[in-house]
DNA sequence: CTTGTTTGTTCACTTCCCGGCGTAATCGGT
DNA sequence: ACCGATTACGCCGGGAAGTGAACAAACAAG
């Protein structure tokens, strides 16, 4: 009836301490683990033998170097064995679906992508996604039964309470809880979130935001969204729709936005609109990749447009930085790495944010490019599995 | 050499669990404590006897009612004995100093206030504050040696790393770390923070934001600042200067602000400026109190000005709500409770924030009025003492 | 007065962690 | 090649903490 005893919880806590230390630092000796956790060597030994019995860790055959330069018995390194089973990630964009199969450390083993007009109707896209997951598992040589969890993202805010897509941003997805739907199709737990949030998670774990505690990740592509990391954890807000930075109003009489308001920042800086601005001046058909290339090459028109867009985004970010005083701003999405965009953002932050706030924030491009989302969904799935009891 | 053993830490953790439960729920029986903490009655008994030996809790003479309506041995309630020693709070504003002496539960026993031009020079104000603390202790009949810690706030952002006041907002306080200075004068630990932050803490603990996890507390008085609570904890940012909502630019060619920019929101809505707008139309000299009274009485001019100010603030808050998706917005400061101001804020949030964000946020006036800060500084001191080992 | 219920305590037992001792393995010096 | 120094690891006994069962105490209801 009552919760399991405190002593067992203590042991569990110590076990977790050992495992996280091991996860963070890589293979180590028992003695090092003892030093790192503050536990005694005896206890660590006991924990490690228990963990070896359940197969969660194993000893490395390769002997490590003695502790401190000098002599001594060489330690036996104990290493985290890759947990059994696998996970998958599903990145659903406006115009693409991308899936990945990965082991439970987050290493991606197979990947698939399709171009597809996702917006139009949801069920078909979800069928397709489920199919791609199964296919990716096959390519990676993983039996379907090994799948433990799936992470997914959609390019729209997701209400955590109804698990529905908030507001009519994505037509054809009304009243369709994407997580539940995919879960029904695949038969394993699905963790769904917004694309900017998983992007932030990816950059936080493996990208430009590694080690930062307070970071704002902005994603600029078809839309404009932000994933906000505070205290090292994703901030989702009361109803889970935090990060809607794209709907700051920048002009009373601006273009009408899909959200229903007028003059939203998103209508000014979204990639399609920027391309629309530039296209008349170029012969070839522009794409975001081409625009980025032209920017790196120093094309004046592109630089001007991207710099202006950066300034507009930076204006909103400056306000947000004043409020949150973050350590970093990471810019992702298809246009994220453009130098002019970054410069524009930096300039606006320097201009509009408080001097001390501006001085303490780093502005950097995302390191994961268009694979940020899929990396993040995999991380979401890995975290989701780890949160359950390891049984 | 090594850290104290895990077992002792376990007992300490369980003791803390009992204490916090007791602090949250008030006097309870040992059996209830066992149910609440998940520990066994036996363990709780053991912990309680230990706590009674050190005098941290005591049994109430008044017997409680049996657990569930029916019969049974009546429980003997154990209650948190007011911890020995006391704390003090120091609220430093632009034009006043207010101090309070309180017991370690946060109950205020004596209070003093002075009007004083604090901005001009820091050292004098700090001397004065230290003097007032000693005086308040005397009035409360507390020996000076009982003072364990002091919480204080200043009306300016405070850099946590240098513990200095950030930027030249407060002239005469440059390079003067207020916390350290007061600590030197009083000889006990001083925990210093920004006024909006402690206000948020106060409303969170004892006011309008009780029980909320994500709240934005805005303080509108001489300046405009925000204290941001996320996940039930104050968010201070990387360098501790989060919440600078007053320096959102609302007009390129606005008035020059003390922060160095032009057109900051603060220059438009700060109380002195609002009073300056209204004064010409009134015979008597206006004060914030009078303005609030006129607003409640339905004075058209005041309502218009406050409503416009609310809309301006609400505009900035709407953007922040879009980013953070909080549960509540609490408006404090001398003009906080004005109905027109609140209406204006609510209207702007409804207009400019995403519909789902606006729908999930409550806008309310602070409940603590001009005593929010002093309550918060006391809470800061209480928390600061509790964080140390109870020895 | 008896019965039932809830509380709080005592006791025997288990779980867990720690320190010390002994053994294993390697390095550097002679 | 040998020997001390150093580090790593396992085993054993001791101590600390928590738990369940049993028991006395205090009341309400019948």
Image: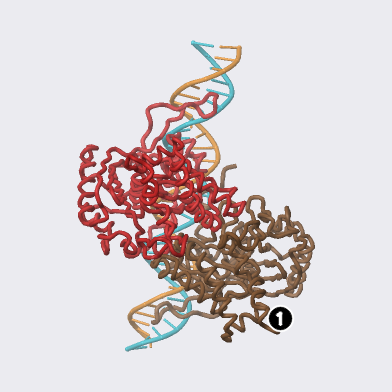
Chain colours: A red, B brown, C orange, D cyan
Disc 1 crowd, CA 10 A, few/some/many (<14, 14-19, 20+): few
The chain containing the residue under callout 1 comes to: B
Q: Residue A353: name its quadrant.
A: bottom right
Total numbered labels? 1
Residue that carries the numbered disc 1 in the rendered image: B285
Image vertical order of residue D26 relative to residue A82, above or below: below
In the figure, is residue B287 to the left or right of A123? right
Image vertical order of residue B156 relative to residue D2, above or below: below
Q: Position of residue A288 (x, y in %)?
A: 36, 43
Q: Position of residue C2 (x, y in %)?
A: 34, 83
In the figure, is residue B359 to the left or right of B170? left
A212 or B112, which lies in front? Answer: A212
Q: Position of residue C8 (x, y in %)?
A: 49, 70
B179 or D9, which lies in front? Answer: B179
Q: Position of residue A345 (x, y in %)?
A: 50, 48
Image vertical order of residue A195 relative to residue B195, above or below: above
- Whether residue B105 is visible to the viewer of this picture, yes or no, is no
B133 or A122, which lies in front? Answer: A122
Q: Secondary structure at mark 1?
A: loop
A39 or A363, which lies in front? Answer: A363
Give the residue at x 37% y 65%: A260
- Whether residue B302 is visible to the viewer of this picture, yes or no, is yes
Q: Residue B38: name its quadrant.
A: bottom left
Q: Quadrant of the N terminus of chain A?
A: bottom left
Give the residue at x 70% y 66%: B92
């Amino acid at each position: 009836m009552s919760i399991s005893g405190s002593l067992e919880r203590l042991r569990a806590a110590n076990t977790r301490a050992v495992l996280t230390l091991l996860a963070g630092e890589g293979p180590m000796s028992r003695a090092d683990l003892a030093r790192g956790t503050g536990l005694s060597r005896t206890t660590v030994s006991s924990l490690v033998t228990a963990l070896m019995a359940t197969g969660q860790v194993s000893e490395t055959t390769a002997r490590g170097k003695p502790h401190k330069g000098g002599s001594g018995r060489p330690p036996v390194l104990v290493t985290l064995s890759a947990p059994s089973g696998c996970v998958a990630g599903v990145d659903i964009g406006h115009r693409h679906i991308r899936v990945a199969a990965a082991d439970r450390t987050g290493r991606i083993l197979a990947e698939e992508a399709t171009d597809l007009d996702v917006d139009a109707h949801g069920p078909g896209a979800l069928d397709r996604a489920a199919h791609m997951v199964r296919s990716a598992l096959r390519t990676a040589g993983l039996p379907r039964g090994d799948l433990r969890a799936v992470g997914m993202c959609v390019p729209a805010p997701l209400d955590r309470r109804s698990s529905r897509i908030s507001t009519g941003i994505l037509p054809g997805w009304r009243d369709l809880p994407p997580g539940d739907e995919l879960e029904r199709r695949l038969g394993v737990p699905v963790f769904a979130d917004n694309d900017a949030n998983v992007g932030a998670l990816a950059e936080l774990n493996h990208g430009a935001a590694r080690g930062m505690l307070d970071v704002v990740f902005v994603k600029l592509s078809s839309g404009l969204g932000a994933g906000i990391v505070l205290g090292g954890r994703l901030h989702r807000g009361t109803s889970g729709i935090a990060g809607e930075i794209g709907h700051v109003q920048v002009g009373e009489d601006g273009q009408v936005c899909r959200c229903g308001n007028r003059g939203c920042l998103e209508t000014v800086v979204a990639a399609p609109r920027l391309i629309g601005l530039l296209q008349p001046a170029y012969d070839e058909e522009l794409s975001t990749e081409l625009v980025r290339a032209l920017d790196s090459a120093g094309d004046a028109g592109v630089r001007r447009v991207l710099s202006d867009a950066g300034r507009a985004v930076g204006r909103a970010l400056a306000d947000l930085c004043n409020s949150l005083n973050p350590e970093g701003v990471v810019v992702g999405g298809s246009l994220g790495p453009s130098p002019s965009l970054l410069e524009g953002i930096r300039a606006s932050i320097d201009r509009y944010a408080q001097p001390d706030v501006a001085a303490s924030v780093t502005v950097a491009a995302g390191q994961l490019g268009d694979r940020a989302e899929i990396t993040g969904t995999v991380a979401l799935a890995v975290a989701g599995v780890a949160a359950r009891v390891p049984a």
